[in-house]
Amino acid sequence: MKKAICLFLALCLTFGCAAMLSGCGSSKDTTTLYVYNWGQYISEGDDGSLDVIAAFEEAYPNIKVQYSTYDSNEIMYSKLSNGGITVDVIIPSDYMVGRMRQEGMLMELNFDNIPNYQYIDESYKNTSYDPENKYSVPYTWGTVGIIYNTKYVDEADVTGWELLWNEKYAGKILMFDNSRDAFGIAEYLLGYDVNTTDEAELKACADKLAQQKPVVQQYVMDQIFDAMENEEAWIAPYYAGDYLTMVEENPDLAFYQPQEQGFNIFIDALCIPTCCQEKEAAELFINFLCDPEICAANLDSLGYSVPMTEAKQYLDPEQAKNPIAYPSEETLRNATSFNYLPEETSRYMESLFMEVRNG
Amino acid sequence: MKKNNAVLLSTPYLLWMAAFTLIPLGVVCYYALTDPATGAFSLRNLRDLGMYLPVLWQSIVYSLAAAAICLVLGYPVAYYIAQCGQTAQKLLYMLVMLPMCMSFLLRTLAWVGLLQDTGIINTLLGKLGIGPLRLIRTPGAVILGMVYNYLPYMILPLYSIIVKIDRRLIEAAEDLGCNGVQVFGRVILPLSVPGILSGLTMVFVPSVSTFYISQKLGGTDTVLIGDVIERQFKQGNNPNLGAALSLVLMVLVFVCTGIMNRFGGDSEEGGVIV
Amino acid sequence: MKRANRFITILIFIFLYIPMAVLIVASFNTGKDITQFQGFTLNQYARLFQDSGLLKLLGNSLIVSVLASFIATAFGTVAAVGIHNLNPRMRKAAMTLTNIPMTNPDIVTGVSLSLLFVFVGTQLLGQRNSLTFWTLLIAHITFNLPYVILNVMPKLKQMDSSLTDAAMDLGCTHVQAFFKVTLHEIMPGIVSGAIMAFTMSLDDFVISYFVSGLDFVTLPVEIYSYTKKPLHPKIYAMFTLLFLLILVLMVAMNLIQLYADKKKTASHRAGM
């Protein structure tokens, strides 16, 4: 018995040391770049698509990417502001870029290292979250809408955001598990400005969301893929790009934007947080992602929309014409983007959302 | 000489434990008493705790239920294993241990696959013509998850107590005219009380503080205190309220284990399996 | 009565093993949905071995658990000897301190350590990156130590103290007496403490989840983030392989022990 255990421990120790040595050996003259991205938000080489990170490491053999993911802007923000961690590249959404810029959490980019910035379309520059284009480089853009399963959902019920409150589908409805997107929906439904700072309006939104809770199956982010694809849930608000990924697996899914009530249009942008330790490598990475060919290959498999006309020629023509990925001006007339909110408002909204979730 | 050695040998350990158990608890108190936005001293988090009393109550009820079910299910198993032959005992003991060594996240996820509306059980029932039952996202599913994950923590301490019961006591009781039920009720059960108490604690404590089980198997209304703490830290950007809630949870657990120990008399080894 | 118990035991074992069976079956599934078996394939295993990330995470878990249990065992054994020789009042205090992490729910331990590391790292030392491999290791050592202490202490109590006295009478120093006599006597406690520490460390999710940063992540923590995304079936393949590995290890350990026991009783009998 004792011998066996000794042997086992010795074996473990050698394994451990070997693994450690192999880990240390490679880190000598290479830089490690910490990329912190949304889950399901970079092409990983499944089904013959481009493995973006592998391609980057091949192009820059002395940089090793350490890739981690988060579920929502709020989780990323929470981790960066309290977590005591360092990362080099993050991809927050517009309002979060604004918030982090205001709070001094972002570094100014050196655009000499990002020549591919020239390809970004003018309409994605000079935005309200980064008016002087100093801190962020657009990665993708997209819209939020309702995904529903045509097998189970009556077309007559598909009118607007109130579908998510419809008791007929109780237990089959998913909801955003992040405060800003969830409050956004309540604000569109109640007709408030999505960038309101009025506490009474926010409280009303929270009440509306609490009222929805009994019909909600789960509050989710990326778990939505499995739930919608295998028909565990029938109705969910989510991002258009992810709908395009889901519909490939389950053709019964449909996507709908409540055009009268308004819906969110967002830009997710590449940024470098102040805790970054490898700024130059981070800029190389950002530049790499903005290469029109890489950008097209990456976003083709993600389903999200490219922020550069230059890249469209490399896209799958089907995708480039897809009205869900690239909606018309007419569709977008009521689309609004989230601006950053003052810190008290953000905190208030988060605490209200926590009350909704926990109550 | 000997005494000096003892102090010399144990001091580094005591310092280490103080640094990494007592001081962290102090830091938790510090966070619990500061305002998340300004960092100034504030009682706000403690005031906000009142809102989470229903959640706390729900956690206690669920985990008590889980502990009770574990006892009812685990006792016969432990008793049976203790009565088997040496080799069978070892084998069965191993089979109880084995699930504990596997990722509880994935095992819980397997339950999602079994219980969900489009899951394995409902598909099978569907073939029999029974409509989809609502199995997942109910309080029952959460309790099931707790029972499933922590049942071995009940069986193992019970087994190690029952197996040590002196056979002669049982024989003596039989000689004195007790029937099987009386032997069990008057001899075996009272003697296995320490195992029962340690099993109950070992199921209750992880159950009351779990967050993964309720996130995966629970619905929107089966929120547990562990969920709230996890969410305040990881998502809600309010570690201060999270810290205050952890303090509450800690006090709750210490009170409960204190009560258990009071009943069980003191045992310095209490809480150790195997 | 016995028959009823046997029936319940069988049912409980089915209950305990069904979810694992589901995962194992899922690892051979061509589809990615756990609930529908579409066809048999070994592709998931091939995918698993192509995924250097997952294997690296497994390596990470092994590094932390081996180092933590090794350090905790050495440190804890020495400490247990010290505590054993303390005066009763101090001993009681030391045991209370040992019991705190044992009784505390994991989530509280995790939260408190993470707050400590972040507080000390960012506010006192001015570091940017305060959740690293080292903090994870400290956390693991901390929750491993009580297991070692609580396994070694009873053995020390059982040990006949005149043995060490005899050794010293025969000219051993304290240190020699420890290594030649005490260590031998308490070995079973040390070994079971080490094994327990190792498995606790390897399996730990909750504490690691709160304490780890982004640069060094263990397998359970990453599995948690996998379960929040569409889960790739190669995870099931990994589960199956780990299941087999642990099963083989456990059976082997049992067989060896059985063999040793037999040998012991045989020699015992021969001696009589």
Image (spheres, rainbow, N blue to C red):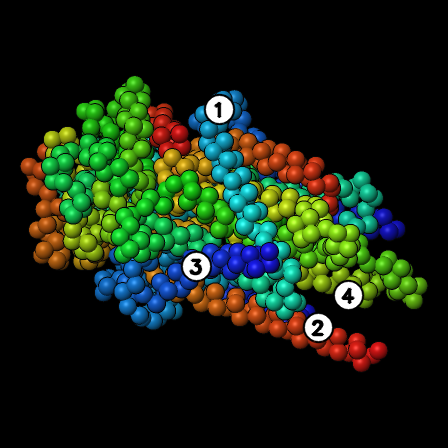
Q: Is residue A290 visible?
A: no
| Chain identity of mark 2 | C
Q: List x then y, in percent, for residue A350.
A: 36, 30
Q: Earlier in the sequence, mark 4 or mark 3?
A: 3
- Residue beneath label 1, please? B50
Residue at mark 2 to residue at mark 4: CA–CA distance: 19 Å
Residue C128 vs B128, above or below: the answer is: above
Residue under pointer 2: C261
C-alpha separation, residue under disc 1 versus residue under disc 3? 41 Å
State the mark number for residue C184: 4
Residue B165 vertical placement versus A274 (above, below)? below
In the image, is A157 to the left or to the right of A182? left
| Separation of residues labelled 3 and 2 (CA atoms) | 33 Å
Residue drawn at x 38%, y 31% as measured from the top left: A354
Q: Amino acid at mark 3?
A: Ile
To which chain does the residue with label 3 belong? Answer: C
Residue C188: horizontal and vertical position, in percent? 71, 63
